[in-house]
Image (cartoon, grey):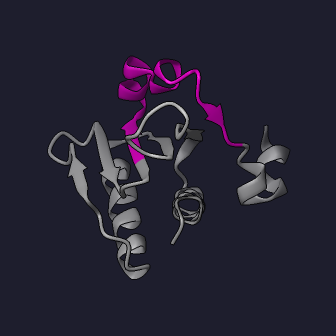
């Protein structure tokens, strides 16, 4: 599976599972860490865990190995490393504090309506 296919699969799942404020940053020109960062929020630590569990299950079904997972204990920020795609699932206040989008402001933001269809642009 390509990095773009992984990213799209995770984004679609997060959208179905009601993650909020999903953003995708293409960072391949800025770092060797990954090609894409997926950043999303959840209103509770319970939903942070549920979203992370869903992503892990979905990617296991796709036979995509999880290389590293961090932050499960506190449930304020879970990072899931799939090599060329890194998924950050935040409790909303933690996301506001760390502001990864500002840290990586030079990255290209991917338009989600291209991935999720017109429903995203209708909601904005």
Left or right of 89 on screen, residue 20: right
* Among the 4 quarters of the image, the one containing residue 51: bottom left
Q: Nearer the viewer, residue 107 or 51?
A: 107
Q: Is residue 82 above or below residue 102?
A: below
**Range drawn in magenta:** 87-110
Residue lying at 44% horizontally and 79% vertically, measured from the top left: 62
Residue 32 position within the rendered picture, expressed as x and y whole percent measured from the top left: 40, 40
Left or right of 79 on screen, residue 119: right
Q: Is residue 79 above or below residue 13?
A: above
Q: Nearer the viewer, residue 34 or 46?
A: 34
| In magenta segment, residue 14 | no
Residue 40 position within the rendered picture, expressed as x and y whole percent measured from the top left: 49, 42
| In magenta segment, residue 98 | yes
Residue lying at 57% horizontally and 56% vertically, measured from the top left: 11
Residue 9 position within the rendered picture, expressed as x and y whole percent measured from the top left: 56, 66
Residue lying at 79% horizontally and 43% vertically, measured from the top left: 123
Residue lying at 84% horizontally and 55% vertically, measured from the top left: 118
Q: Name the quadrant of the C terminus.
A: top right
């Amino acid at each position: 599976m390509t990095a773009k296919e992984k990213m799209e699969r995770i984004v679609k799942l997060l959208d179905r599972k009601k993650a909020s404020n999903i953003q995708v940053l293409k960072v391949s020109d800025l770092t060797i860490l990954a090609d894409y960062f997926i950043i999303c929020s959840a209103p509770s630590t319970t939903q942070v865990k549920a979203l992370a569990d869903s992503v892990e299950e979905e990617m296991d079904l796709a036979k995509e190995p999880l290389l590293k997972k961090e932050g499960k204990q506190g449930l304020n920020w879970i990072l899931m490393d799939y090599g060329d795609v890194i998924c950050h699932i935040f409790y909303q206040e933690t996301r506001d504090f760390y502001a990864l989008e500002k840290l990586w402001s030079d990255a290209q933001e991917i338009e989600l309506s291209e991935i999720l269809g017109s429903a995203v642009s209708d909601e904005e």
